[in-house]
Structures are given as structure tokens and as C-alpha cells.
């Protein structure tokens, strides 16, 4: 079953509003998101779940997370990003290309330079929510042997 595009964008808009509400309330975010998403056929379809996994896979690299947090503050060039992350420019270039390909960041040309920024301002809220969830579960994450047993996604 294919969901029409107008319903898909409406559902994404409602999900974004719901995430903002959860972030503001900070009351049981994981439970509320599960309840919200459980009634929608969007994530029940296998292809949508695989697409969502690909969207998140790029975040398994700590350098990509540092880049996203850096770009949340303002637009930056590749050189500024490399200096902030502390890795060579070609490494940052490939990470920026991955983030851009997955829709996390956008690029703007000004003269001969590329200026990178977050493609969607909601990504800042997402990163804050992810940090909050990670902090709330830091003990479990530190002891999780499951993460060490499986190769990273990519």
C-alpha cells in the first residue's frame, strides 16, 4: 500500500509538531513517540523502515555528529568544519557529502566557496532530543555489550 504524498507530508508535519511538544514537556519522550507512531502505516512498511535506517546510519560516525552540531550554530566552510572537528579536509569533505546526500545538510555557493548549513532547522531539536535521551540512558549505553558485538552500520 502506497501512501499519497499529501498525507505523507501532513504526517511528517504532525510528527515534527509532536516532537517539539515532547521536547518541551520532557515527559516520557520514548513512550509518547512509540504511541504516536504505532498507529501510522508509514513506518509499518518495510521500505519506509529501511529508508529511515539509512537516514540515521550516517549518524553512527562521531565526526558526522560533531559536524551537525557545529553547523547548527551557523553556516561554515569545509575548512572551518575541518578545523573544528580536527580531521583532514578530505575526510570532512566525504562526511559532508554523506550528510548532504542523506538530507541532513544543504550547501550554498558564494563565489568559489561552499557554505554548509543544516538543511532543516528541526535537526537542531532532533540533536537536542538525542543528547537528552543518551544522557538519560548513559548507564545502559556504557554497559551495552550488544553495541560491541556487531559491526557498525554503513
Image (cartoon, grey):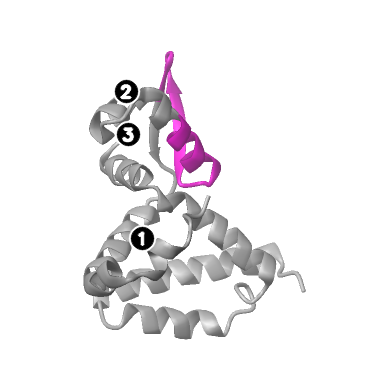
* Mark 3 crowdedness (10 Å alpha carbons): few <14, some 14-19, many ≥20: some
Above or below 147: residue 110: above
Q: CA distance from mark 3 to mark 2?
A: 12 Å
Above or below 25: residue 125: above
- Residue at 32% across, 63% down: 130
Residue that badge 1 annotates: 126
Q: Quadrant of residue 122?
A: bottom left
Q: Position of residue 126 (x, y in %)?
A: 36, 60
Q: Is residue 40 left or right of residue 95?
A: right
Residue that badge 3 annotates: 75
Q: Quadrant of residue 89?
A: top left
Q: In the structure shown, which secondary structural element does the residue marked by tag 1 occupy?
A: helix
- Residue at 48% across, 71% down: 14
Q: Quadrant of residue 38?
A: bottom right
Q: Nearer the viewer, mark 3 or mark 1?
A: 1
Ranked by sequence position, the earlier of labels 2 and 1 is: 2
Residue that badge 2 annotates: 79
Q: Which residues are magenta?
A: 94-114
Amino acid at each position: 500500500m502506497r501512501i499519497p504524498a499529501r498525507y505523507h507530508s501532513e504526517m511528517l508535519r504532525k510528527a515534527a509538531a509532536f516532537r517539539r511538544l515532547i521536547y518541551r514537556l520532557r515527559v516520557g519522550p520514548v513512550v509518547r513517540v512509540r504511541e504516536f507512531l504505532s498507529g501510522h502505516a508509514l513506518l509499518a512498511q518495510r521500505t519506509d523502515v529501511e529508508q529511515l535506517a539509512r537516514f540515521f546510519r550516517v549518524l553512527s560516525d562521531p565526526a558526522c555528529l560533531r559536524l551537525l552540531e557545529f553547523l547548527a550554530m551557523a553556516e561554515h566552510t569545509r575548512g572551518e568544519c575541518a578545523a573544528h572537528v580536527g580531521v583532514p579536509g578530505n575526510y570532512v569533505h566525504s562526511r559532508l557529502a554523506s550528510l548532504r546526500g542523506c538530507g541532513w545538510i544543504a550547501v550554498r555557493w558564494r563565489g568559489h566557496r561552499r557554505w554548509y548549513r543544516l538543511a532543516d532547522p528541526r535537526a537542531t531539536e532532533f540533536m537536542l532530543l538525542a543528547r537528552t535521551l543518551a544522557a538519560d540512558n548513559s548507564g545502559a549505553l556504557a554497559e551495552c555489550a550488544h553495541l560491541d558485538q556487531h559491526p557498525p552500520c554503513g
